[in-house]
Image (tube, helix red, strand yellow):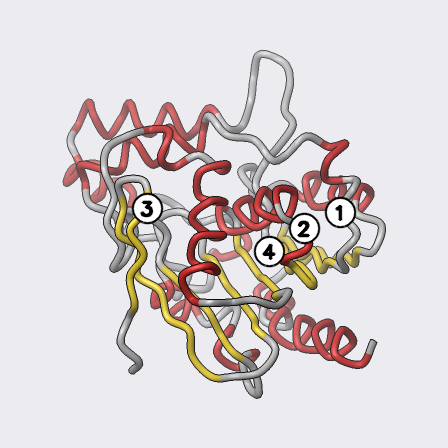
Amino acid sequence: MTDDRYLTRDGATIAYQYTGSGTPLGYAHGVFLSRDAVRRMELFDFDTLSAGRGLITYDQRGHGQSTGRPVVTDYTFANVALDLLGVLDAAGVDEPIDFAGSSWGAAAALHAAVIEPARFRSLVLIIPPVAWEDGPVQARQWYSDTADEIERVGGPAWRKAWANADPLPIFADYPKFDLTPEVPDELLPSVLRGIGQSDLPPQELVGELRMPSLIMTWETDPLHPAETAQRLHELIPASQLHIAASVPEIQTWTARTAEFLSLRERS
């Protein structure tokens, strides 16, 4: 296994790797997870996609091998987008990158692409999070409610209850879908509140993105509703959309991404 490199930024030390050579491909994981946790799920294989390419992966701040601090604003979509750009700078990525992100990672990629669109050759947006909500009842309230619960009962008790909670219906028969948080107890409330206070970039800015984009999501997940993916597809002119209704369909996402990236190579 290649040794990690480290970027220190805004109160965090971010562990990342840049392996291989060729057209660069990047990947950013979602909340609670890490690079290795994504690998263990066996749903999306970014290592296979890196054949003949340079691959940059990292653990988001406060997750996996990266450190963080209990500051809510550190974990907002806007700030982790700056982490992403900082990792690209630290790794010396000086050409447009194909970048894939899941959930929190998709939000980071979108914000980073709005800030510096020329740095991205294409985007692969996997289960983009709930966004652009209005009204008194919002799905994102789950994040702040869960942060309150962790502070009320304590990290160990909350982790036990979380481990025993029913999975999303689509993963009811897939035990490898493991969301055990790879985050220290003392950071969990800040991580969750930072995400809960975030939103995707304004729709008018998303609509200005011109890089080809592949958008993939699954059903039965209120924190990653199909409506967000559909709206992104409407906003981004050069985009494709796939909505999965089963685990076998989700497991086609690596091949779909490979085909999408292959088309980019030939264009």
On residue 9, the disc is 3
Q: CA distance from mark 4 to mark 1?
A: 17 Å
Quickly name the residue at label 2.
117
Say few, some or many: other residues with alpha carbon within 10 Å of mark 3 (under 14 / 14 to 19 / 20 or more). some
Left or right of residue 235: residue 42: left
Q: CA distance from mark 1 to mark 2?
A: 7 Å
Q: CA distance from mark 4 to mark 3?
A: 26 Å
Mark 3 vs mark 1: which is more N-terminal? 3
What residue sits 15% from the left and 31% below the top? 154
Quickly name the residue at label 4.
126
Q: CA distance from mark 3 to mark 1?
A: 27 Å
Quickly name the residue at label 1.
209
Question: Could you tell me which secondary element the residue under label 4 belongs to?
Answer: strand
Residue 217 lies, with reference to residue 207, above or below; the image says below
Q: Are marks 1 and 2 in contact (CB under 8 Å)?
A: yes
Q: Nearer the viewer, mark 1 or mark 2?
A: 2
Residue 79 at x, y percent in the picture: 44, 38
| Residue type (three-letter) at the residue carrying disc 1 | Leu
Q: CA distance from mark 2 to mark 3?
A: 21 Å
Residue 167 at x, y percent in the picture: 43, 49
Question: Could you tell me which secondary element the residue under label 3 belongs to?
Answer: strand
What residue sits 27% from the left and 57% below the top? 64
Residue 31 at x, y percent in the picture: 40, 47
Residue 235 lies, with reference to residue 51, above or below; the image says above
Mark 2 vs mark 3: which is more N-terminal? 3
Left or right of residue 140: residue 244: right
| Residue type (three-letter) at the residue carrying disc 4 | Ile
On residue 29, the disc is none
Q: CA distance from mark 2 to mark 4?
A: 19 Å
